Image (spheres, rainbow, N blue to C red):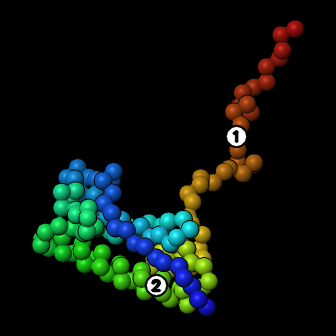
Amino acid sequence: MKNYQNLTLLFWHRKSKADRKGNAPVICRLSIEGEEEAEIATGKKVHSGEWCLDNKKALGTSAQAKEINLKISEMTVDLNRLFTVLQTQHERITPLMVKNLYQGKPVNQPKEINIKPQPKNDEANPTLLLYPKVKPLV
């Protein structure tokens, strides 16, 4: 089965979720042309001053920077390998399929949507039933 899709990985620094110290999570965005993107958290945080926008890696030679860059490299290798495996099994691949496989979930599991469960009719307590009936003024 020939599959000519390309996987693109973009590691970026989510500044909007920075903590008080200025450390923000590093996120991996998976893109496959024509498909909805998916994002995976790396589980690592980096200070905004220690993030290289050009290379998409942590700056410096500190242990933390090396650990973050190692995680980015490992994720890149793992995600590309999983994408290659999926190419042999499926005709059309989505970033969500790659993400699910990386996270150990079933490949075709739908995206999780958090919706509050609606109460059943017998559990519902309409507010009008709480008040006694009032006789009309005639």
- Give the number of the disc on residue 85: none
Disc 1 packing (10 Å; few <14; some 14–19; many ≥20):
few
**Is residue 14 left or right of 121 when viewed as pictured?**
left
Exactly how many numbered labels are in the figure?
2
Give, as a three-letter code, the residue at label 2. Answer: Leu
- The answer, for residue 100, to whether it is visible in the render is no
Determine the secondary structure under disc 1. Answer: loop
Residue 13: give x, y in percent of width and height.
30, 60
- The answer, for residue 27, to whether it is visible in the render is yes
**Is residue 82 left or right of 132 when viewed as pictured?**
left
Q: Residue furthest top?
A: 138
Determine the secondary structure under disc 2. Answer: helix
Residue 28: give x, y in percent of width and height.
38, 68
| Residue displayed at 28% across by 76% down | 71
Q: Residue furthest right?
A: 138
Instruction: Nearest to the eye among marks 1 and 2: give it.
Output: 2
**Is residue 12 left or right of 30 when viewed as pictured?**
left
Residue 1: give x, y in percent of width and height.
61, 91
| Residue displayed at 84% across by 14% down | 136
Q: Residue furthest left?
A: 61
Give, as a three-letter code, the residue at label 1. Answer: Asn
Compared to residue 130, the image places residue 29 above or below, namely below
| Residue displayed at 37% across by 68% down | 10
- The residue identified by callout 1 is 125
Compared to residue 134, the image places residue 10 above or below, namely below
Whole-number angstrom distance, CA of label 1 to CA of label 2: 50 Å
Viewer-closest of 103 and 2? 2
- The residue identified by callout 2 is 82
Q: Which quadrant holds residue 44?
A: bottom left
| Residue displayed at 46% across by 84% down | 82
Query: Residues at badges 1 and 2 in contact (C-beta under 8 Å)?
Result: no
